[in-house]
């Protein structure tokens, strides 16, 4: 049976706390710096907010822009030997999954780095399987329902590790 983590973030500070914990975990999990994470949810669910907090927690400096118009924003977290690339994709404006191929994203996905993908359904069939799918649901102005599932054996291993943490264990199912 596949593991799932479900919870509720009461406000943006809870989103930030989760992002901080996830950034720390990704730097310690085997292959975590090369994770593929899909972010799902309606407009305004908090996908970009989560990414901004995750990028800051990972050590990204400078301005963090939404890739809504650019489709992808590259970032670098850390410095020196601990530096790692992070790619933030927003496929909202794609009308045809073939646009993913035409844009040359296959090379990015074949290389190292964390890939964070908003609106992955717009490029259905083109993306490699996600390690994690984080689905967000706006319950009201502040609260977000959160559902995390794994799409790869590596992601399953990470989810098991997450569920072993105090924050993860309270919402396991």
Image: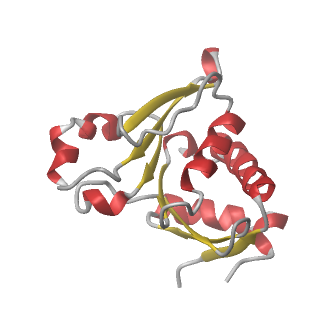
Q: Is residue 26 left or right of residue 15?
A: left
Q: Residue furthest right?
A: 166
Residue that appears at 79% across and 67% down: 10
Where does the image place residue 97, in percent across and percent down from the top left?
19, 55
Q: Is residue 136 visible?
A: yes
Q: Is residue 73 left or right of residue 23?
A: left
Residue that appears at 44% across and 53% down: 118
Residue that appears at 75% across and 55% down: 12
Q: Is residue 147 visible?
A: no
Q: Is residue 57 above or below residue 137?
A: above
Where does the image place residue 54, in percent across and percent down from the top left?
65, 43
Q: Looking at this view, is 9 or 134 the one in front?
A: 9
The C terminus - image quarter: bottom right
Where does the image place residue 106, in percent across and percent down from the top left?
25, 40
Residue that appears at 62% across and 65% down: 159
**Res 115 → quadrant:** top left
Where does the image place residue 135, in percent across and percent down from the top left?
53, 68
């Amino acid at each position: 049976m596949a593991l799932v983590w479900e919870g509720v973030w009461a406000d943006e500070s809870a989103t930030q706390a989760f992002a901080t914990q996830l950034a720390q975990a990704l730097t310690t999990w085997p292959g975590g710096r090369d994770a593929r994470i899909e972010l799902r949810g309606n407009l305004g669910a908090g996908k970009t907010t989560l990414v901004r907090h995750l990028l800051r927690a990972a050590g990204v400096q400078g301005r963090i822009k939404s890739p809504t118009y650019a489709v992808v924003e590259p970032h670098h977290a850390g410095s020196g030997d601990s530096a790692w690339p992070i790619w933030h994709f927003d496929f909202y404006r794609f009308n045809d999954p073939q646009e993913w191929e035409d844009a040359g994203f296959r090379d990015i996905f074949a290389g190292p780095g964390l890939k964070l993908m908003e609106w992955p359904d717009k490029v259905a069939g083109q993306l490699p399987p996600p390690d994690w799918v984080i689905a967000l649901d706006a319950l009201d102005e502040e609260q977000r329902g959160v559902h995390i599932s794994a799409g790869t054996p590596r992601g399953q291993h990470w989810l098991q590790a997450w569920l072993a943490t105090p924050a993860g264990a309270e919402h396991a199912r």
